[in-house]
């Protein structure tokens, strides 16, 4: 049985979740989420996921690498948060998690029942739309716990604003 999310109940404010990374297209997804949240009175959560270092534990190298990756994720989240503030006048919730991006994304959605929409950026390069978009468009699309908005990376800001 599918559990009904709390964000759909009266008195709860829905949240949009945008995954922040270092891709060029990420800003497009953040823009869409910020504009749409402002328009409907929702709030926004920005997620940065750090991949744990592999077998670099010798003399604390792994810890240093982990700290550097977390600092980079925080920097990206701060930049995205500044964009949200400028675009929509909203104060976003920032979350940094360590692990596999898809797993951490699902864990956050399960933990916060007010998250009602996932916003992802689709890459436009030779490598395809990105691993998360590809995975969600495949077999897991019908079983994902919330709707997913995929923002193509080639859209202009004016087009995104009109869609939001």
Image (spheres, helix red, strand yellow):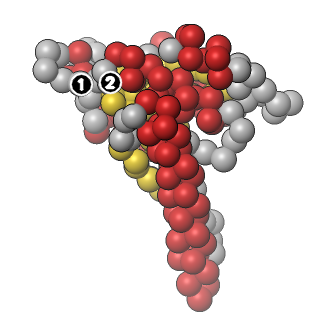
Along the line of sight, the residue nearer the viewer: 146 or 155: 155
- 77 lies above or below 153: below
Q: Secondary structure at mark 1?
A: loop
Dot 2 or dot 1: first in sequence order is 1
**Viewer-proximal residue, 141 or 115?**
115
Q: Is residue 113 left or right of residue 132?
A: left
Q: Residue furthest left?
A: 11
Residue 8: where, in percent of width, then height? 23, 15
Q: Is residue 159 above or below residue 73?
A: above
Quarter occupied by the N terminus: top left
| Residue depicted at x 53% and y 40% | 83
Residue 50 is situated, as x and y percent measured from the top left of the image, at 54, 55
- Of residues 39 and 141, the one nearer the viewer is 39
Whole-percent x, y for residue 73 in the image: 54, 56
Q: Residues within 10 Å of mark 2 (few under 14, many from 20)?
A: many
The local secondary structure at tag 2 comes to: loop
* Dot 1 alpha-carbon crowd within 10 angstroms: few under 14, some 14 to 19, many 20 or more: some
Residue appearing at x 40%, y 49% in the figure: 95
Q: Which residue is mark 1?
A: 13
Name the image quarter holding residue 36: top left
- Residue at (26% x, 30% y) in the render: 113
Judge whether 76 appears above or below 145 on screen. Answer: below
Residue 156, percent across and down? 70, 20
Mark 2 near mark 1, Cβ–Cβ under 8 Å? Answer: yes
Tell me the residue that label 2 is attached to. Answer: 42
Is residue 145 visible in the rendered image? The answer is: no
Residues at marks 2 and 1, CA–CA distance in whole angstroms: 6 Å
Look at the image and tell me whether residue 98 can be seen: yes
User: In the shown orientation, is residue 31 left or right of residue 97?
Assistant: right
Instruction: Determine the residue positioned at 32% across, 24% down.
Output: 42
């Amino acid at each position: 049985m599918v559990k009904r999310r709390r964000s759909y109940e009266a008195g709860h404010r829905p949240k949009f979740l945008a995954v922040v990374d270092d891709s060029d297209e990420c800003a497009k997804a953040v823009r869409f989420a910020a504009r749409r949240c402002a328009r409907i009175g929702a709030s926004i959560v920005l997620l940065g996921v750090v991949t744990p270092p592999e077998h670099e534990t010798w003399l604390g190298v792994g810890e240093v690498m982990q700290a550097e990756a977390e600092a980079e994720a925080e920097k990206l989240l701060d930049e995205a948060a500044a964009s949200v503030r400028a675009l929509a006048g909203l104060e976003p919730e920032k979350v940094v998690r360590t692990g596999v991006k898809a797993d951490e994304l699902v864990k956050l959605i399960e933990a916060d029942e007010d998250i009602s929409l996932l916003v992802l950026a689709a890459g436009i390069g030779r490598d395809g739309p990105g691993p998360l978009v590809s995975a969600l468009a495949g077999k897991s699309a019908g079983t994902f716990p919330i709707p997913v908005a995929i923002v193509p990376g080639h859209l202009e800001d004016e087009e995104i604003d009109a869609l939001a």
